[in-house]
Structures are given as C-alpha cells and as structure tokens.
Image (cartoon, rainbow, N blue to C red):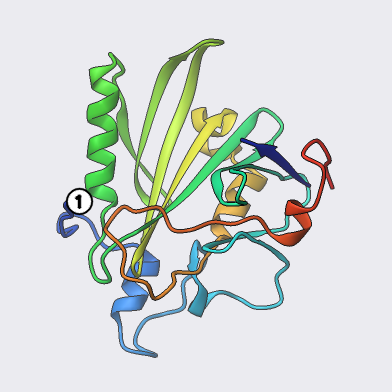
C-alpha cells in the first residue's frame, strides 16, 4: 500500500565495532566475502526477482501490510519516507559515506548527545545490525518509544527510526523489519559530502496520483 503526503561533517573509522555485512562485503575482493543473509543491500548485491518501489537512491520491497508514506516537495523530490504497519512506524533516511569507513558510530553518538541535551536518557543495545539506540521521548501526544538503527554500506549509511510497538520491543518489528532487511540502496557515482542525504524522488505512479489517494 502506498500513499503520498505533500509537503562539512567529519567522519571516523569504526574501529571499536566490526563493519556491517554490507560494508564488509564491499571491502572484500570478489568471491572472498560470504553473501549477506539479509539487507539493507547495496544494489550490486541485491537479490533479483523482487518487486520494489523505486525512490531513486532507495528501493523499498513491496510487502503486504506495509504502507509507504512519502513527503515530497513541489519538484517531486522526497523529503521524508515513513513505512507504517498498525501502531508501528519506520522512518528511513540514506546518506553519503566514505567507501571504506562506517559513520554510524559517530552519528549514533551525536543522536545520543542531542537527546541528552533535551533531558532524554537513551540506552545502547545490541540488535541484529549491531549497536542500536533506544529511548523514551516526550511528544505532544505523550511519552513515546523510539529506536535508532544504523547500517553502514559502501559509500552510504541507512538510518532507520522505529517508533511505536516496534521501538519498544524489537521482536514486534514484524513486516517493518522485513522491509528494512529487504531495502536496496542505489548509490550514484557523484562525489558527495559525508552525511549528505542521497537524492530520493517520486516514482511516476506516485507523482501522478491524487495526494489523498492510496493504492
């Protein structure tokens, strides 16, 4: 289900944590690294024969029960991507990164520092993608659970923000977890500053539909 809504940083080598599967495979010679068991995938390693919604730098697998909401500017550029399943949501972002270095460790530290400045005490936990960040934050609707997940790839980083039930209990990810592990990143060849968001665009079928329409 798809819907539409209108609408010079430094980097460090991730020395104290092993690289993600996506990044480790990109650093190995062809045939030297085992095929990853799940994504997010770099496009050159992505499984074929999977129906995906093409948003440019991100391709999202079509999964029954997952609603894809995008916020786009008048030019069709996407400013926000959120996947929704019941009481859970998953916000996705993809950013430029060095070819051989991960940036999630540093990004995670900065998120934690910003939360601390707002009086929130986040905790680091270990998940299937490595170190994650969880917290309970105040919103206009009351306290809410959030969980940040980062995946380093070759010249890209995916930042995933779970909200709702999937944030409080990772075992409740359900189809949103399936969507994240089936995500494909298409990194262009343009040189980009580290952390710059990679370009996202509306596919034709979403650009042409009525903003209130769902398919």
Q: x and y percent of residue 115 in the render?
A: 29, 24
Q: x and y percent of residue 135 in the render?
A: 38, 25
Q: How many marks do you count on the picture?
A: 1
For this rendering, which residue is in front, 205 or 31?
Answer: 205
Q: x and y percent of residue 22 in the render?
A: 40, 68
Mark 1 lies on a secondary structure that is loop
Residue in the picture at 31% in, 70% down: 191
Residue in the picture at 41% in, 44% down: 149
Is residue 176 shown above or below 31?
Answer: above
In the image: residue 178, left or right of residue 213: left
In the image: residue 11, left or right of residue 54: left
Residue tagged 1: 8
Is residue 58 shown above or below 177?
Answer: below
Can you tell which quarter of the image residue 131 is in? top left
Q: Residue furthest front?
A: 74
For this rendering, which residue is in front, 118 or 210?
Answer: 210
Q: x and y percent of residue 20 in the render?
A: 34, 62
For this rendering, which residue is in front, 133 or 188?
Answer: 188
For this rendering, which residue is in front, 209 or 132?
Answer: 209
In the image: residue 127, left or right of residue 67: left
Answer few, some or many: residues within 10 Å of disc 1's Cα (few below 14, many 20 plus, some between 14 and 19): few
Residue in the picture at 36% in, 76% down: 25
In the image: residue 24, left or right of residue 38: left
Is residue 6 shown above or below 140?
Answer: below
Residue in the picture at 41% in, 38% down: 148
């Amino acid at each position: 289900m798809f819907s539409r809504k209108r609408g010079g940083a430094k980097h460090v080598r991730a020395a104290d944590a092993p690289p993600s599967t996506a990044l480790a495979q990109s650093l190995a010679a062809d045939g030297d690294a085992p095929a990853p068991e799940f994504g997010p995938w770099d496009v050159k390693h992505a499984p074929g024969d999977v129906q995906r919604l093409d948003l440019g730098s991100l391709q999202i697998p079509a999964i029954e029960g997952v609603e894809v909401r995008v916020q786009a500017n008048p030019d069709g550029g996407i400013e926000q991507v959120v996947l929704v399943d019941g009481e859970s949501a998953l916000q996705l972002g993809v950013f430029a990164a060095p070819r051989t270095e991960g940036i999630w460790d540093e990004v995670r530290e900065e998120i934690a520092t910003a939360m601390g400045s707002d009086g929130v005490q986040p905790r680091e936990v270990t998940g299937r993608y490595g170190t994650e960040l969880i917290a309970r934050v105040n919103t206009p609707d009351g306290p809410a659970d959030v969980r940040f997940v980062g995946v380093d790839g070759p010249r890209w980083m995916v930042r995933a923000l779970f909200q709702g039930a999937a944030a409080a209990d990772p075992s409740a990810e359900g189809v949103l977890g399936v969507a994240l592990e089936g995500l494909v990143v298409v990194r262009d060849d343009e040189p980009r500053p580290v952390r710059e968001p990679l370009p996202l665009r509306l596919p034709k079928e979403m650009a042409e539909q009525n903003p209130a329409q769902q398919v």
